[in-house]
Image (cartoon, grey):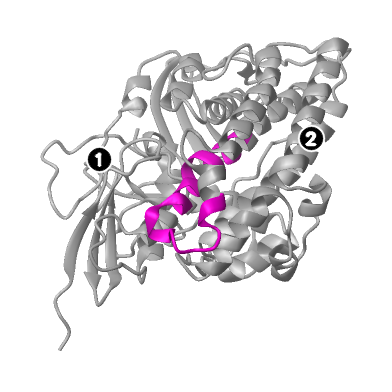
Amino acid sequence: MTDSPARLVVGPFNRVEGDLEVTLDVQEGRVASARINAPLYRGFESMLEGRDPRDALTITPRICGICSISQSAAAARALADAMGLVPEPQGARVAALIHAVENIADHLTHFHVFFMPDFTRPVYADRPWHGRMLERFTAATGSALTRAVAARAALFHILGMMAGKWPHTLAIQPGGVTKAPTARDKARIQATLRSFRRYLEEVLFGAPVEAFADLASVAALEGWSGGDVALFLEAAADLDLAALGRGSGRYLSFGAYPMPEGPIFARGIWDGALRAFDPAAIREDISHAWMLGETRHPSQGETRPDEDMAAPAYSWCKAPRLDGLTVETGALARQVVDGHPLALALAAEGGVRARVAARLLEIARTQLVMEELAAGIRPEESFMARAILPREGAGMGLVEAARGALGHWLTIERGRIARYQIIAPTTWNFSPRDAAGMPGPVEAALEGAPVRAGEVTPVSVQHIVRSFDPCMVCTVH
């Protein structure tokens, strides 16, 4: 006869953006079930109601200080959709460049500040790589962190030139961008990207960016021997992180960096094969959220908090589902949907190593994307299209933040915002159970995670949670 599960509450998590609490039922040294609570209600969707639609460009970026450009881009796309406006091609190019800078910086921060410091824990003191981890990734003092922070700061010079400031820029607008770059700006952008490439090649990858971007198999990845990537891969192999925290194998991407000819990274669903994505198939289940109302498509959604916080609900986060199923979003999902051979191979394992390796792959590929975007800037062309904001209308803005699929849904009535709904990547990944009892993606990934005797914050749970890179302040609006 087996013992009854022991309950363990883990939280608040350190090195996570926002508040996160995880309740674990542990049986025979493993997680039997998990429930994830997003304990901070924010109310941004309600704040927007009754305002001028253009206020969304100012307010939604303030949802988050890490991925504010992603929120800005989604708001601009939703407004453009409502206006029937197509951004100028050069405006779309610069908006994509600005957005890519934020996303690649976000991946860099996740690797160095959020994920890798877990390997410096005393629990790993007997591992052959632990001393090198201490030197490179100890919080605040690690040499890898020092170099990464400097490289990130230098890369952000592009945002200073083209976005005016970061975070919370107003540079991205429905019709394009507010600043038309000069030939001098273009040259400075390209010089900044060359400097960032040197950092990637000398420190992170220890080899040309193209070499990592061209990896086509797990075997080729495991043979990588350069830079801090090799140190991660050594620890991941030693701890078998490929098998830890496996997901459902269903991946969603809204398509990253929209251009006139389509997104640079493809849009779609992958569940063993690539399928078209239909936004009409999204529903937000509220059965286990402290919310009032009904399960609806976000275009008809409501934000009415249940102040009584009645059971069976246990989170402020709604549970978005696609055709009734959970999907995982993020860099792994983007690269799988885009058809990259290494990402497809990593999807077969679908665990902690796959998610982190996919971010590293995306850093390499995004560097190449940024260089191409910068090379195509034509200062003599127009960067902003204009149109009149309708008094009645609706729009949808779908973009890819660093953490995955981000959607804004806007309804305008009598010239004012009547409804505004947002589904962030962490809303998808860290959702609670739905009416059918189906756990959210991270809840499901935590099942089976080992818990060592006496652990209060199991290190395996830390690795799994951080492999999804939660941004809890974006989760509940």
Type of amino acid under label 1? Pro
* Mark toward the viewer: 2 or 1: 2
Q: Is residue 178 above or below residue 417?
A: above
Crowd tier of the residue under label 2, counting other residues whose Cα lies within 10 Å: few below 14, some 14–19, many 20 or above: some
Main SS of the magenta part reads: helix
Identify which residue is drawn at 63% across, 28% down. Answer: 152
Q: Position of residue 313 (x, y in %)?
A: 20, 51
Identify which residue is drawn at 70% across, 36% down. Answer: 258
Q: Position of residue 325 (x, y in %)?
A: 43, 62
Label 1: element kind:
loop
Residue span colored magenta: 105-132
Whether residue 445 appears in this view of the structure is yes
Asked if residue 315 lies left or right of residue 144, the reply is left
Q: Position of residue 139 (x, y in %)?
A: 46, 38
Mark with earlier residue (2, 1): 1
Q: Is residue 8 above or below residue 31?
A: above
Label 2: element kind:
helix
| Mark identifier at residue 198 | 2
Crowd tier of the residue under label 1, counting other residues whose Cα lies within 10 Å: few below 14, some 14–19, many 20 or above: some
Residue highlighted by disc 1:
39
